[in-house]
Image (cartoon, helix red, strand yellow):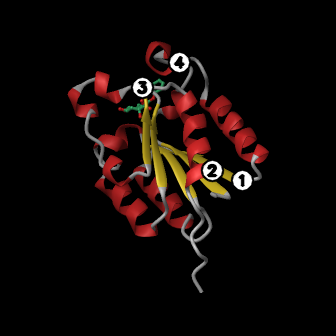
Amino acid sequence: MATSILLINGPNLNLLGTREPGTYGSTTLPQVIEAAEKQCSSKSITFASLQSNHEGVIIDRIHEARGNVDAIVINPGAFTHTSVAIRDALLGVDIPFVEIHISNVHKREAFRHHSYLSDKAEAVICGLGVYGYEAAIEYASRHIKPKEKSQ
Ligand SMILES: O=C(O)[C@]1(O)C[C@H](CCCOc2ccccc2)[C@@H](O)[C@H](O)C1
């Protein structure tokens, strides 16, 4: 199953654990990433991560993943609800991805109820808090198969 996973976190998630603990919890992003690294290491899965507040940086990283990443776990942040460009990048590189949201976006403002990614995701996880990252990686490690290496 997946032997290389890229974790992408979108805008403002660098604030995780420092603001709005009632919505996003008190775990920091570095703590989330450290736990993901350990989870992947325990499964001999290569792990990389990016957090960016900039759409183009996220898109460029998705492009870089083509051919060397088996699965992407992505919390696009607010770009979930706005970014056709990130959708197009994910489809363009043809890498299976799992969409994760810390909060239950369906219990929040109406503008958070639509995602430009969900209909193309292998799985969508939301409302589990930061455990959603662990669940997403577990799912990817079990269910997403590496693609045959193109000649
Ligand atoms: O629930 C999620 O994970 C979201 O992707 C988080 C986004 C917000 C990311 C900002 O995260 C913060 C964390 C702590 C403090 C402030 C913002 C929000 O725009 C989505 O609708 C749902």
- Across and down, in percent, residue 121 comes to 40, 51
Which callout, 3 or 4, points at the residue further toward the start of the chain?
4
Q: Which residue is mark 1?
A: 45
> Mark 3 to mark 2: distance in Å?
23 Å
Secondary-structure class at tag 3: loop
Which of discs 3 and 2 lies nearer the camera? The answer is 2
Q: Which residue is mark 4?
A: 25
> Mark 3 to mark 4: distance in Å?
9 Å
Indicate whether 149 appears above or below 133: below
Which of discs 1 and 4 lies nearer the camera? The answer is 1
Which of discs 3 and 1 lies nearer the camera? The answer is 1
Label pair 1/2, CB-CB below 8 angstroms:
yes
Q: Which one is nearer the viewer's eye here, 81 or 12?
A: 81
Q: Is mark 3 within 8 Å of ligand 1?
A: yes
Q: Which residue is mark 2?
A: 141
Secondary-structure class at tag 1: loop
Q: Which one is nearer the viewer's eye here, 11 or 93?
A: 93
Label 1: few (<14), some (14–19) or many (≥20) C-alpha neighbours in 10 Å: some
**Residue shown at 46% from the left, 68% from the top:** 93
Which of discs 1 and 2 lies nearer the camera? The answer is 2
- Across and down, in percent, residue 81 comes to 29, 41
Indicate whether 20 appears above or below 40: above
Which callout, 1 or 2, points at the residue further toward the start of the chain?
1
Q: Which mark is residue 103?
A: 3
Label pair 1/4, CB-CB below 8 angstroms:
no
